[in-house]
Amino acid sequence: MDELNTDGVFSKPAAAKAVRRVRANGAPAGEAVDVDPVASDVGLKRQQTATSLLYHRLRFDILHGTLAPGERLRVETLRERYKIGSSPIREALSRLSSEELVNFVDQKGFQVSDISIEDLQELTRSRCLLNEIILREAIKNGDEAWEEAIVLAHHRLSRSKKVKDSRPELWGRHHRSFHDALVAACGSRWLRNMSMTLFDCAERYRWRSADLERSTYQERDVDQEHLMIMQATINRDTETAIRLLNEHAVTTARIIIDEWNKDLHQAPN
């Protein structure tokens, strides 16, 4: 593998090599594929069904907090909001329910899944336990194309940090792609899907806490964390890679929980 420079972005020759490979052969095996619910690619939208389009739109709005935790999802309201029929709405909500993003409550119908400190703690523990299996398998099975996909995903993530404040959704997509690329060679679509479902559920908390004071993150270098995770993974240092990936998830959860507790203590009686 080509070495990375001190800024955490692989060298121009290495980047050019990876890009040439993508252009010549398509995306490297195992590279994460983004699904952007607000993409302007008309050709892609024409291939998707109304249910699939609505599913991605609802999913995006739930993950980014446009549809708030606990909010009722009445079919009539959604029909007016998204300008679509009742049948695709019900199908999309059922699909989101299987991902724990939507709940069905007797006598009340569908609603956005709620969030809590206890849920975030359980979610983080589940991610860490799964990482022990899935990242280990990916490192064992991954080939050169998998390594290149990780490097390329990290390169895109590193470049997008320049617009993280002005275009947070773009950074979020590249962040997701990087984490997916790490485990893409695990050999199990079930485990990979489970990993990204847990990642997306955790992202709800990160997006909800995106307005935390910058001082909360001053002592944390997220870009360096991503770089170290990437290096350990492609160097096949399994135990270090797992430890760094789990510390990455735990640190995010701890920051969010500490801030929530601080808000509770500061709230007026």
Image (cartoon, rainbow, N blue to C red):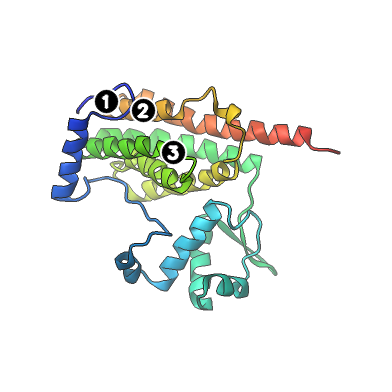
Q: Earlier in the sequence, mark 1 or mark 3?
A: 1
Rendered residue at 31%/21% (across/down): 6
Instruction: Write down the residue under mark 3.
Output: 130
The part of the image, by quadrant, that contains residue 123 is: top right
Q: Quadrant of the C terminus?
A: top right
Rendered residue at 72%/35% (across/down): 263
Rendered residue at 59%/45% (across/down): 208
Report if the CB atoms under discs 1 and 2 are less than 8 Å apart: yes
Residue type, mark 3 in image = Leu
The part of the image, by quadrant, that contains residue 144 is: top left
Residue 186: % across, % down? 31, 41
Looking at the image, is 98 positioned above or below residue 222? Answer: below
The part of the image, by quadrant, that contains residue 259 is: top right
Residue type, mark 2 in image = Leu
Looking at the image, is 71 positioned above or below residue 141? Answer: below
Instruction: Write down the residue under mark 1.
Output: 4
Looking at the image, is 26 positioned above or below residue 235? Answer: below
- Examine the rendering and report whether any part of residue 113 can be seen: yes
Residue 81: % across, % down? 57, 70
- Examine the rendering and report whether any part of residue 98 can be seen: no
Q: Residues within 10 Å of mark 2 (few under 14, many from 20)?
A: many
Residue type, mark 1 in image = Leu
Q: Earlier in the sequence, mark 2 or mark 3?
A: 3
Instruction: Write down the residue under mark 2.
Output: 227
C-alpha distance separating marks 1 and 3: 28 Å
Q: Earlier in the sequence, mark 1 or mark 2?
A: 1
